Amino acid sequence: MAVPELRPWRAAGPHVARAAGAVRPRLARAARAAGQPLTRFARATTPQLARITRPKTWQYTAGAATAGLALAAGVVTAAGPWDSTGQRTAEQDRAVALAHTGGADHGGGSAGPGAPRPAPSAPAVLTGLTGASDRTAGGVKTAPRGEPLADALGPLLDDPELGTRRGAAVVDLSTGKRLYGLGSGTALTPASTTKIATAVAALSALGPDHRLTTRTALEADTGELVLVGGGDPTLTAREDPRGLAGLRTLAERTAAALKKRGTGTVTLSYDTTLYTGAEAHPIGVNENLAPVTALMADEGRTDDSTSGPAPRVADPAAEAARAFAGFLEDHGITASAPGPSKATNRATTLATVSSPPLSALVERMLTHSDNDIAEALARHTAVATGQPADFEGVSAAVTARLKQLGLPVRGAVFHDGSGLDRTDRISADLLTALLAVAADPARPELRPALTGLPVAGFTGTLAGRYPDGAAGGLVRAKTGTLTGVNTLAGTVVTADGRVLAFAFLADGTTDASAAQKALDAAASRLTACGCA
Protein backbone atom coordinates (compact mmCIF):
# COMPACT_ATOMS: atom_id res chain seq x y z
CA MET A 1 0.00 0.00 0.00
CA ALA A 2 1.17 3.54 -0.66
CA VAL A 3 2.16 5.43 2.47
CA PRO A 4 2.86 9.16 2.21
CA GLU A 5 6.37 10.21 3.09
CA LEU A 6 6.50 12.69 5.94
CA ARG A 7 8.45 15.77 5.03
CA PRO A 8 11.59 16.88 6.91
CA TRP A 9 11.40 19.77 9.30
CA ARG A 10 12.43 22.88 7.40
CA ALA A 11 13.52 24.64 10.58
CA ALA A 12 16.27 22.10 11.08
CA GLY A 13 18.26 23.75 8.31
CA PRO A 14 20.18 22.40 5.32
CA HIS A 15 22.67 20.58 7.52
CA VAL A 16 19.96 18.08 8.38
CA ALA A 17 19.63 16.91 4.81
CA ARG A 18 23.38 16.54 4.47
CA ALA A 19 23.61 14.60 7.74
CA ALA A 20 20.68 12.37 6.86
CA GLY A 21 22.32 11.50 3.56
CA ALA A 22 25.44 10.41 5.37
CA VAL A 23 23.70 8.50 8.14
CA ARG A 24 24.20 4.92 6.99
CA PRO A 25 27.96 4.94 6.36
CA ARG A 26 28.48 6.92 9.52
CA LEU A 27 26.35 4.51 11.50
CA ALA A 28 28.41 1.62 10.21
CA ARG A 29 31.73 3.31 11.06
CA ALA A 30 30.52 4.40 14.48
CA ALA A 31 29.14 0.96 15.24
CA ARG A 32 32.38 -0.79 14.34
CA ALA A 33 34.33 1.65 16.49
CA ALA A 34 32.02 1.47 19.47
CA GLY A 35 31.47 -2.27 19.58
CA GLN A 36 28.22 -1.74 21.48
CA PRO A 37 26.01 -0.15 18.83
CA LEU A 38 22.45 -1.04 19.60
CA THR A 39 22.37 0.59 23.00
CA ARG A 40 23.20 3.88 21.37
CA PHE A 41 19.96 3.96 19.46
CA ALA A 42 18.54 6.65 21.68
CA ARG A 43 21.39 8.96 20.71
CA ALA A 44 21.42 7.97 17.07
CA THR A 45 17.93 9.14 16.30
CA THR A 46 16.65 12.64 15.85
CA PRO A 47 12.94 12.74 15.16
CA GLN A 48 10.90 15.63 16.36
CA LEU A 49 7.18 16.11 16.04
CA ALA A 50 5.25 19.05 14.68
CA ARG A 51 1.63 19.57 13.89
CA ILE A 52 0.46 20.93 10.57
CA THR A 53 -2.79 22.61 9.80
CA ARG A 54 -4.42 20.18 7.42
CA PRO A 55 -7.05 18.00 9.14
CA LYS A 56 -6.08 14.45 10.06
CA THR A 57 -2.45 14.96 9.13
CA TRP A 58 0.76 15.30 11.12
CA GLN A 59 4.39 14.89 10.42
CA TYR A 60 7.60 13.78 11.97
CA THR A 61 10.46 16.18 11.70
CA ALA A 62 13.84 14.88 10.78
CA GLY A 63 17.18 15.72 12.32
CA ALA A 64 20.77 14.65 12.01
CA ALA A 65 20.85 10.96 12.81
CA THR A 66 24.60 10.98 13.28
CA ALA A 67 24.72 13.74 15.87
CA GLY A 68 24.05 11.44 18.79
CA LEU A 69 26.86 9.07 17.83
CA ALA A 70 29.37 11.87 18.34
CA LEU A 71 28.46 12.27 22.02
CA ALA A 72 30.87 11.12 24.68
CA ALA A 73 30.37 7.75 26.34
CA GLY A 74 29.58 9.54 29.58
CA VAL A 75 26.37 10.84 28.09
CA VAL A 76 25.25 7.27 27.45
CA THR A 77 25.46 6.37 31.10
CA ALA A 78 23.29 9.35 31.96
CA ALA A 79 20.53 8.19 29.65
CA GLY A 80 19.74 4.94 31.41
CA PRO A 81 21.16 1.88 33.16
CA TRP A 82 24.22 1.51 30.95
CA ASP A 83 27.74 0.32 31.78
CA SER A 84 30.88 2.15 30.67
CA THR A 85 30.87 0.41 27.30
CA GLY A 86 27.30 1.32 26.47
CA GLN A 87 25.71 -2.07 27.15
CA ARG A 88 22.58 -2.07 29.19
CA THR A 89 23.33 -3.55 32.61
CA ALA A 90 20.05 -5.45 32.62
CA GLU A 91 21.28 -7.35 29.59
CA GLN A 92 24.55 -8.12 31.31
CA ASP A 93 22.73 -9.42 34.36
CA ARG A 94 20.46 -11.54 32.20
CA ALA A 95 23.43 -13.08 30.40
CA VAL A 96 25.08 -13.87 33.72
CA ALA A 97 21.94 -15.49 35.08
CA LEU A 98 21.48 -17.68 32.03
CA ALA A 99 25.08 -18.85 31.67
CA HIS A 100 26.44 -19.14 35.22
CA THR A 101 29.95 -19.19 33.77
CA GLY A 102 31.48 -15.97 34.99
CA GLY A 103 31.04 -12.37 35.93
CA ALA A 104 29.39 -9.55 34.10
CA ASP A 105 32.59 -8.41 32.38
CA HIS A 106 31.64 -8.49 28.75
CA GLY A 107 34.82 -6.82 27.64
CA GLY A 108 36.86 -10.02 27.73
CA GLY A 109 40.14 -8.99 29.31
CA SER A 110 42.82 -11.33 30.61
CA ALA A 111 41.70 -14.09 32.89
CA GLY A 112 44.18 -16.25 34.75
CA PRO A 113 44.40 -20.01 34.36
CA GLY A 114 41.37 -21.74 35.77
CA ALA A 115 39.38 -18.53 36.05
CA PRO A 116 35.71 -18.71 35.05
CA ARG A 117 34.97 -17.60 31.53
CA PRO A 118 33.22 -14.25 31.20
CA ALA A 119 29.47 -14.49 30.84
CA PRO A 120 28.49 -14.38 27.17
CA SER A 121 27.11 -11.19 25.72
CA ALA A 122 23.96 -11.20 23.66
CA PRO A 123 25.29 -10.91 20.08
CA ALA A 124 22.08 -9.47 18.69
CA VAL A 125 22.08 -6.74 21.32
CA LEU A 126 25.61 -5.73 20.52
CA THR A 127 25.74 -5.96 16.74
CA GLY A 128 22.57 -4.24 15.68
CA LEU A 129 24.14 -1.38 13.75
CA THR A 130 26.66 -3.27 11.67
CA GLY A 131 25.48 -1.70 8.46
CA ALA A 132 25.62 -5.12 6.77
CA SER A 133 22.58 -5.30 4.56
CA ASP A 134 23.09 -8.99 3.80
CA ARG A 135 23.07 -10.01 7.47
CA THR A 136 20.40 -12.31 8.79
CA ALA A 137 18.77 -11.55 12.14
CA GLY A 138 18.73 -14.65 14.26
CA GLY A 139 18.01 -16.86 11.28
CA VAL A 140 15.29 -14.64 9.83
CA LYS A 141 15.83 -14.17 6.12
CA THR A 142 16.77 -10.63 5.21
CA ALA A 143 14.39 -8.87 2.88
CA PRO A 144 15.85 -7.62 -0.39
CA ARG A 145 16.89 -3.97 -0.25
CA GLY A 146 14.24 -1.77 -1.78
CA GLU A 147 11.34 -4.15 -1.14
CA PRO A 148 8.27 -2.13 -0.12
CA LEU A 149 7.62 -2.66 3.54
CA ALA A 150 3.96 -3.28 2.81
CA ASP A 151 4.98 -6.41 0.87
CA ALA A 152 7.14 -7.66 3.74
CA LEU A 153 4.89 -6.73 6.64
CA GLY A 154 1.40 -6.75 5.21
CA PRO A 155 0.90 -10.52 5.00
CA LEU A 156 2.03 -10.97 8.60
CA LEU A 157 -0.41 -8.37 9.89
CA ASP A 158 -3.13 -10.05 7.87
CA ASP A 159 -2.86 -13.12 10.11
CA PRO A 160 -6.38 -14.06 11.29
CA GLU A 161 -4.96 -14.61 14.78
CA LEU A 162 -4.77 -10.81 15.05
CA GLY A 163 -8.52 -10.51 15.38
CA THR A 164 -11.03 -8.33 13.63
CA ARG A 165 -9.51 -4.84 13.98
CA ARG A 166 -5.85 -3.89 13.52
CA GLY A 167 -3.76 -0.78 13.55
CA ALA A 168 -0.10 -0.53 12.62
CA ALA A 169 2.55 2.10 11.95
CA VAL A 170 6.29 1.97 11.27
CA VAL A 171 8.52 5.05 11.23
CA ASP A 172 12.22 5.44 10.44
CA LEU A 173 13.53 7.39 13.40
CA SER A 174 16.58 8.70 11.60
CA THR A 175 14.67 10.38 8.79
CA GLY A 176 11.16 10.86 10.13
CA LYS A 177 9.75 8.92 7.18
CA ARG A 178 6.69 6.83 7.83
CA LEU A 179 7.33 3.52 6.13
CA TYR A 180 4.06 1.73 6.76
CA GLY A 181 0.56 2.43 7.94
CA LEU A 182 -2.50 0.24 8.40
CA GLY A 183 -5.41 1.96 10.09
CA SER A 184 -2.70 3.92 11.86
CA GLY A 185 -4.91 6.88 12.72
CA THR A 186 -7.69 4.78 14.25
CA ALA A 187 -7.68 4.78 18.03
CA LEU A 188 -7.98 1.24 19.41
CA THR A 189 -7.74 -0.34 22.85
CA PRO A 190 -4.01 -0.12 23.68
CA ALA A 191 -3.84 -2.27 26.84
CA SER A 192 -0.48 -1.80 28.56
CA THR A 193 1.12 0.11 25.70
CA THR A 194 -0.74 2.97 27.42
CA LYS A 195 2.24 3.02 29.79
CA ILE A 196 4.38 4.56 27.03
CA ALA A 197 2.05 7.57 27.07
CA THR A 198 2.10 7.63 30.87
CA ALA A 199 5.91 7.57 30.84
CA VAL A 200 6.26 10.44 28.38
CA ALA A 201 3.62 12.54 30.15
CA ALA A 202 5.16 12.04 33.59
CA LEU A 203 8.72 12.68 32.41
CA SER A 204 7.69 15.85 30.60
CA ALA A 205 5.70 17.13 33.57
CA LEU A 206 8.09 16.21 36.39
CA GLY A 207 11.51 15.59 34.86
CA PRO A 208 13.66 12.45 35.12
CA ASP A 209 15.31 13.46 38.41
CA HIS A 210 12.08 13.97 40.35
CA ARG A 211 11.69 11.77 43.43
CA LEU A 212 8.60 10.78 45.41
CA THR A 213 8.98 11.55 49.11
CA THR A 214 7.32 9.91 52.10
CA ARG A 215 7.65 11.82 55.37
CA THR A 216 6.63 12.02 59.00
CA ALA A 217 5.23 15.22 60.46
CA LEU A 218 4.71 16.15 64.11
CA GLU A 219 1.75 18.35 64.97
CA ALA A 220 2.93 21.04 67.39
CA ASP A 221 -0.36 21.48 69.22
CA THR A 222 -1.39 17.86 69.73
CA GLY A 223 1.83 15.88 69.47
CA GLU A 224 0.22 13.71 66.81
CA LEU A 225 2.70 11.98 64.50
CA VAL A 226 1.46 11.79 60.91
CA LEU A 227 2.87 9.39 58.33
CA VAL A 228 2.35 11.38 55.12
CA GLY A 229 2.06 9.39 51.90
CA GLY A 230 3.95 10.87 48.98
CA GLY A 231 2.54 8.59 46.32
CA ASP A 232 5.57 6.30 46.17
CA PRO A 233 4.38 2.80 45.20
CA THR A 234 7.93 1.47 45.54
CA LEU A 235 8.17 2.33 49.24
CA THR A 236 9.20 -0.92 50.91
CA ALA A 237 8.84 -2.46 54.34
CA ARG A 238 11.39 -5.16 53.54
CA GLU A 239 14.53 -5.40 55.65
CA ASP A 240 16.74 -4.81 52.62
CA PRO A 241 15.27 -1.91 50.62
CA ARG A 242 17.61 -2.55 47.67
CA GLY A 243 17.86 1.10 46.73
CA LEU A 244 14.19 1.90 47.29
CA ALA A 245 12.77 4.16 49.97
CA GLY A 246 12.56 2.12 53.17
CA LEU A 247 9.73 2.31 55.69
CA ARG A 248 12.14 0.91 58.29
CA THR A 249 14.63 3.66 57.51
CA LEU A 250 11.91 6.28 57.92
CA ALA A 251 10.96 4.77 61.28
CA GLU A 252 14.58 4.82 62.46
CA ARG A 253 15.05 8.46 61.48
CA THR A 254 11.71 9.46 62.98
CA ALA A 255 12.48 7.69 66.25
CA ALA A 256 15.83 9.46 66.49
CA ALA A 257 14.15 12.84 65.96
CA LEU A 258 11.49 12.08 68.57
CA LYS A 259 14.07 11.03 71.14
CA LYS A 260 15.93 14.30 70.63
CA ARG A 261 12.67 16.00 71.63
CA GLY A 262 12.32 13.77 74.64
CA THR A 263 9.26 12.03 73.21
CA GLY A 264 8.79 8.31 73.68
CA THR A 265 5.05 7.91 73.01
CA VAL A 266 3.03 9.21 70.05
CA THR A 267 -0.44 9.13 68.64
CA LEU A 268 0.11 7.85 65.13
CA SER A 269 -2.01 8.64 62.09
CA TYR A 270 -1.56 8.53 58.34
CA ASP A 271 -2.30 10.96 55.53
CA THR A 272 -3.28 9.88 51.99
CA THR A 273 -4.74 13.20 50.84
CA LEU A 274 -2.19 13.77 48.06
CA TYR A 275 -4.58 11.74 45.88
CA THR A 276 -8.28 12.43 45.55
CA GLY A 277 -11.23 10.48 44.25
CA ALA A 278 -11.83 6.75 44.29
CA GLU A 279 -9.01 4.38 45.18
CA ALA A 280 -10.62 1.50 43.34
CA HIS A 281 -9.66 1.11 39.69
CA PRO A 282 -12.65 0.75 37.36
CA ILE A 283 -11.78 -2.93 36.83
CA GLY A 284 -12.40 -3.54 40.55
CA VAL A 285 -10.42 -5.77 42.87
CA ASN A 286 -7.68 -7.37 40.83
CA GLU A 287 -4.33 -9.02 41.52
CA ASN A 288 -2.74 -6.86 38.83
CA LEU A 289 -2.77 -3.77 41.04
CA ALA A 290 -3.51 -2.47 44.52
CA PRO A 291 -6.05 0.22 45.38
CA VAL A 292 -4.63 3.52 44.14
CA THR A 293 -3.52 5.37 47.27
CA ALA A 294 -0.77 7.83 48.15
CA LEU A 295 0.56 5.54 50.89
CA MET A 296 1.47 1.91 50.38
CA ALA A 297 4.39 -0.41 51.05
CA ASP A 298 5.53 -3.01 48.53
CA GLU A 299 2.50 -2.23 46.38
CA GLY A 300 0.27 -3.84 48.99
CA ARG A 301 1.52 -7.30 48.02
CA THR A 302 0.91 -10.07 50.52
CA ASP A 303 3.75 -12.26 49.21
CA ASP A 304 7.43 -11.71 48.45
CA SER A 305 6.93 -10.88 44.78
CA THR A 306 8.13 -7.62 43.28
CA SER A 307 6.36 -7.73 39.93
CA GLY A 308 3.44 -9.40 38.20
CA PRO A 309 0.06 -10.36 39.64
CA ALA A 310 -0.12 -11.00 43.38
CA PRO A 311 -2.71 -10.95 46.16
CA ARG A 312 -3.07 -7.43 47.60
CA VAL A 313 -4.18 -6.08 50.96
CA ALA A 314 -7.57 -4.38 50.98
CA ASP A 315 -6.26 -1.16 52.58
CA PRO A 316 -2.59 -0.56 51.67
CA ALA A 317 -2.34 2.72 53.59
CA ALA A 318 -3.59 1.30 56.86
CA GLU A 319 -1.36 -1.75 56.48
CA ALA A 320 1.70 0.43 55.84
CA ALA A 321 0.91 2.55 58.88
CA ARG A 322 0.57 -0.52 61.09
CA ALA A 323 3.91 -1.79 59.88
CA PHE A 324 5.43 1.63 60.55
CA ALA A 325 4.11 1.59 64.12
CA GLY A 326 5.88 -1.73 64.68
CA PHE A 327 9.14 -0.35 63.30
CA LEU A 328 8.87 2.66 65.62
CA GLU A 329 8.52 0.34 68.57
CA ASP A 330 11.64 -1.51 67.45
CA HIS A 331 13.43 1.81 68.04
CA GLY A 332 11.89 2.51 71.43
CA ILE A 333 8.89 4.63 70.43
CA THR A 334 5.43 3.54 71.54
CA ALA A 335 2.76 4.34 68.94
CA SER A 336 -1.00 4.12 69.11
CA ALA A 337 -3.03 2.15 66.62
CA PRO A 338 -2.94 4.36 63.51
CA GLY A 339 -5.94 5.98 61.90
CA PRO A 340 -6.49 8.30 58.92
CA SER A 341 -5.83 12.02 59.31
CA LYS A 342 -4.28 14.98 57.49
CA ALA A 343 -1.09 16.79 58.35
CA THR A 344 -1.58 20.53 58.81
CA ASN A 345 0.65 23.30 57.50
CA ARG A 346 1.81 23.84 61.07
CA ALA A 347 3.25 20.34 61.39
CA THR A 348 7.03 19.95 61.56
CA THR A 349 8.62 17.42 59.23
CA LEU A 350 10.75 15.03 61.29
CA ALA A 351 12.14 12.65 58.66
CA THR A 352 11.87 11.75 54.99
CA VAL A 353 12.74 8.95 52.58
CA SER A 354 12.67 9.34 48.81
CA SER A 355 12.14 7.00 45.90
CA PRO A 356 14.68 6.40 43.14
CA PRO A 357 14.53 9.10 40.46
CA LEU A 358 11.55 9.16 38.15
CA SER A 359 13.74 7.87 35.31
CA ALA A 360 14.28 4.62 37.24
CA LEU A 361 10.59 4.33 38.13
CA VAL A 362 9.62 4.76 34.49
CA GLU A 363 12.08 2.07 33.41
CA ARG A 364 10.79 -0.35 36.05
CA MET A 365 7.19 0.41 35.05
CA LEU A 366 7.87 -0.32 31.39
CA THR A 367 10.16 -3.32 31.83
CA HIS A 368 7.81 -5.17 34.17
CA SER A 369 4.53 -3.55 33.07
CA ASP A 370 4.04 -2.39 36.65
CA ASN A 371 0.47 -1.16 36.97
CA ASP A 372 0.91 0.34 40.45
CA ILE A 373 3.77 2.55 39.30
CA ALA A 374 1.79 3.50 36.20
CA GLU A 375 -1.21 4.67 38.19
CA ALA A 376 1.05 6.56 40.61
CA LEU A 377 2.93 8.35 37.83
CA ALA A 378 -0.33 9.29 36.16
CA ARG A 379 -1.58 10.81 39.43
CA HIS A 380 1.66 12.71 39.91
CA THR A 381 1.32 14.07 36.39
CA ALA A 382 -2.11 15.37 37.37
CA VAL A 383 -0.73 16.95 40.56
CA ALA A 384 2.14 18.60 38.66
CA THR A 385 -0.21 20.13 36.09
CA GLY A 386 -2.84 21.41 38.51
CA GLN A 387 -5.42 18.72 37.82
CA PRO A 388 -7.23 16.72 40.51
CA ALA A 389 -5.25 13.61 41.42
CA ASP A 390 -8.03 11.21 40.46
CA PHE A 391 -8.90 9.21 37.36
CA GLU A 392 -10.63 12.18 35.71
CA GLY A 393 -7.66 14.42 36.43
CA VAL A 394 -5.32 11.81 35.00
CA SER A 395 -7.25 11.82 31.73
CA ALA A 396 -7.04 15.59 31.41
CA ALA A 397 -3.40 15.84 32.50
CA VAL A 398 -1.97 13.12 30.26
CA THR A 399 -3.85 14.39 27.22
CA ALA A 400 -2.72 17.97 27.87
CA ARG A 401 0.95 16.99 28.25
CA LEU A 402 0.93 15.06 24.98
CA LYS A 403 -0.76 17.95 23.19
CA GLN A 404 1.97 20.28 24.45
CA LEU A 405 4.54 17.96 22.90
CA GLY A 406 2.78 18.29 19.54
CA LEU A 407 1.67 14.66 19.42
CA PRO A 408 -1.33 13.40 17.40
CA VAL A 409 -3.83 12.90 20.21
CA ARG A 410 -6.96 12.94 18.07
CA GLY A 411 -9.20 10.08 19.23
CA ALA A 412 -6.97 9.27 22.21
CA VAL A 413 -8.70 8.54 25.51
CA PHE A 414 -6.92 7.96 28.81
CA HIS A 415 -9.05 6.73 31.70
CA ASP A 416 -6.07 5.45 33.69
CA GLY A 417 -2.29 5.30 33.56
CA SER A 418 -1.86 1.54 33.26
CA GLY A 419 -4.04 0.57 30.31
CA LEU A 420 -6.13 -1.82 32.36
CA ASP A 421 -9.24 0.20 31.52
CA ARG A 422 -10.72 -1.24 28.34
CA THR A 423 -12.17 2.14 27.36
CA ASP A 424 -8.70 3.64 26.83
CA ARG A 425 -7.97 4.45 23.17
CA ILE A 426 -4.66 5.13 21.39
CA SER A 427 -3.75 5.02 17.70
CA ALA A 428 -0.68 3.42 16.19
CA ASP A 429 0.29 6.89 14.95
CA LEU A 430 0.30 8.23 18.51
CA LEU A 431 2.33 5.31 19.85
CA THR A 432 5.05 5.73 17.23
CA ALA A 433 4.98 9.48 17.80
CA LEU A 434 5.55 8.92 21.51
CA LEU A 435 8.54 6.72 20.76
CA ALA A 436 9.89 9.26 18.30
CA VAL A 437 9.70 12.18 20.69
CA ALA A 438 11.39 10.08 23.38
CA ALA A 439 14.25 9.47 20.93
CA ASP A 440 14.67 13.15 20.12
CA PRO A 441 18.15 14.30 21.24
CA ALA A 442 16.61 17.67 22.06
CA ARG A 443 14.49 15.98 24.75
CA PRO A 444 16.89 13.83 26.80
CA GLU A 445 14.49 14.02 29.74
CA LEU A 446 12.17 11.65 27.86
CA ARG A 447 14.81 9.02 27.10
CA PRO A 448 13.75 6.58 29.89
CA ALA A 449 10.58 5.91 27.86
CA LEU A 450 12.93 4.07 25.48
CA THR A 451 15.59 2.68 27.79
CA GLY A 452 12.95 1.01 29.95
CA LEU A 453 11.35 -0.95 27.13
CA PRO A 454 11.64 -4.73 27.61
CA VAL A 455 14.32 -6.38 25.47
CA ALA A 456 13.22 -9.34 23.38
CA GLY A 457 14.49 -12.57 24.89
CA PHE A 458 16.18 -10.78 27.78
CA THR A 459 14.16 -8.60 30.12
CA GLY A 460 10.76 -8.01 31.62
CA THR A 461 7.63 -8.99 29.77
CA LEU A 462 9.62 -9.98 26.67
CA ALA A 463 12.05 -12.26 28.51
CA GLY A 464 10.00 -15.34 27.67
CA ARG A 465 9.11 -14.34 24.12
CA TYR A 466 11.16 -14.82 20.95
CA PRO A 467 12.38 -18.21 22.28
CA ASP A 468 14.07 -19.08 18.98
CA GLY A 469 16.29 -16.02 19.30
CA ALA A 470 15.07 -14.68 15.96
CA ALA A 471 15.09 -11.08 17.12
CA GLY A 472 16.57 -11.36 20.59
CA GLY A 473 17.91 -7.99 21.61
CA LEU A 474 16.95 -6.27 18.38
CA VAL A 475 13.34 -5.73 19.43
CA ARG A 476 12.67 -3.50 22.42
CA ALA A 477 8.98 -3.11 23.01
CA LYS A 478 6.13 -2.63 25.44
CA THR A 479 3.62 -5.43 25.45
CA GLY A 480 -0.11 -5.12 26.00
CA THR A 481 -2.60 -7.85 26.82
CA LEU A 482 -6.26 -7.79 27.77
CA THR A 483 -8.92 -10.34 26.95
CA GLY A 484 -9.38 -10.01 23.19
CA VAL A 485 -6.66 -7.35 22.88
CA ASN A 486 -2.97 -7.79 22.07
CA THR A 487 -0.55 -4.96 21.34
CA LEU A 488 3.17 -4.37 20.87
CA ALA A 489 5.00 -1.07 20.42
CA GLY A 490 8.67 -0.21 20.51
CA THR A 491 11.85 0.00 18.47
CA VAL A 492 13.81 -2.35 16.25
CA VAL A 493 17.20 -2.24 14.56
CA THR A 494 17.07 -3.39 10.96
CA ALA A 495 19.53 -5.43 8.95
CA ASP A 496 20.89 -2.27 7.35
CA GLY A 497 21.40 -0.48 10.64
CA ARG A 498 18.33 1.72 10.84
CA VAL A 499 16.30 2.23 13.99
CA LEU A 500 12.56 2.02 13.47
CA ALA A 501 9.66 2.76 15.76
CA PHE A 502 6.66 0.50 15.36
CA ALA A 503 3.24 -0.02 16.87
CA PHE A 504 0.94 -2.98 16.28
CA LEU A 505 -2.55 -3.14 17.83
CA ALA A 506 -4.93 -6.07 17.48
CA ASP A 507 -8.50 -6.11 18.76
CA GLY A 508 -10.97 -8.98 18.73
CA THR A 509 -8.34 -11.69 19.19
CA THR A 510 -9.44 -15.08 20.50
CA ASP A 511 -6.13 -16.74 21.35
CA ALA A 512 -3.69 -14.51 23.27
CA SER A 513 -0.70 -16.80 22.73
CA ALA A 514 -1.28 -17.06 18.98
CA ALA A 515 -1.80 -13.31 18.71
CA GLN A 516 1.45 -12.63 20.58
CA LYS A 517 3.33 -14.93 18.24
CA ALA A 518 1.86 -13.13 15.25
CA LEU A 519 2.92 -9.75 16.63
CA ASP A 520 6.38 -11.07 17.45
CA ALA A 521 6.73 -12.42 13.91
CA ALA A 522 5.89 -8.99 12.50
CA ALA A 523 8.45 -7.29 14.73
CA SER A 524 11.05 -9.92 13.83
CA ARG A 525 10.39 -9.27 10.16
CA LEU A 526 11.28 -5.64 10.70
CA THR A 527 14.68 -6.55 12.15
CA ALA A 528 15.51 -8.57 9.04
CA CYS A 529 14.36 -5.90 6.68
CA GLY A 530 16.58 -3.96 4.34
CA CYS A 531 13.52 -2.57 2.63
CA ALA A 532 12.61 0.96 1.72
Image (spheres, rainbow, N blue to C red):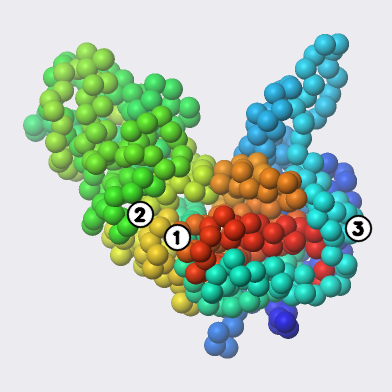
Q: Between tags 2 and 3, which lies in front? A: 3
Which numbered dot is residue 150? none
Q: Residue furthest top?
A: 113
Whether residue 106 is visible to the viewer of this picture, yes or no, is: yes
Q: Nearer the viewer, residue 133 or 436?
A: 133
Amino acid type at circle 3 is Asp
Amino acid type at circle 2 is Arg
Gap in angstroms between the C-alphas marked 2 and 1: 26 Å
| Mark 1 closeness class: few <14, some 14–19, many ≥20 residues within 10 Å | few
Compared across the picture, whether 124 is left or right of 418 comes to right
Q: Secondary structure at mark 2?
A: helix
* Residue highlighted by disc 2: 379
* Residue highlighted by disc 3: 134
Q: Between tags 2 and 1, which lies in front? A: 1
Image-quadrant location for residue 263:
top left
Earlier along the polypeptide chain: callout 2 or callout 3? Answer: 3
Amino acid type at circle 1 is Thr
Q: Residue at position x 29%, y 34% from top?
A: 215
Which numbered dot is residue 483? 1
Judge whether 316 appears above or below 476 on screen: above
Q: Nearer the viewer, residue 271 or 374?
A: 374
Query: Split into 4 quadrants, where in the image is the C terminus?
Result: bottom right
Q: Are marks 1 and 3 in contact (CB under 8 Å)?
A: no
| Mark 2 closeness class: few <14, some 14–19, many ≥20 residues within 10 Å | many
Q: Secondary structure at mark 1?
A: loop
Q: Nearer the viewer, residue 517 or 270?
A: 517
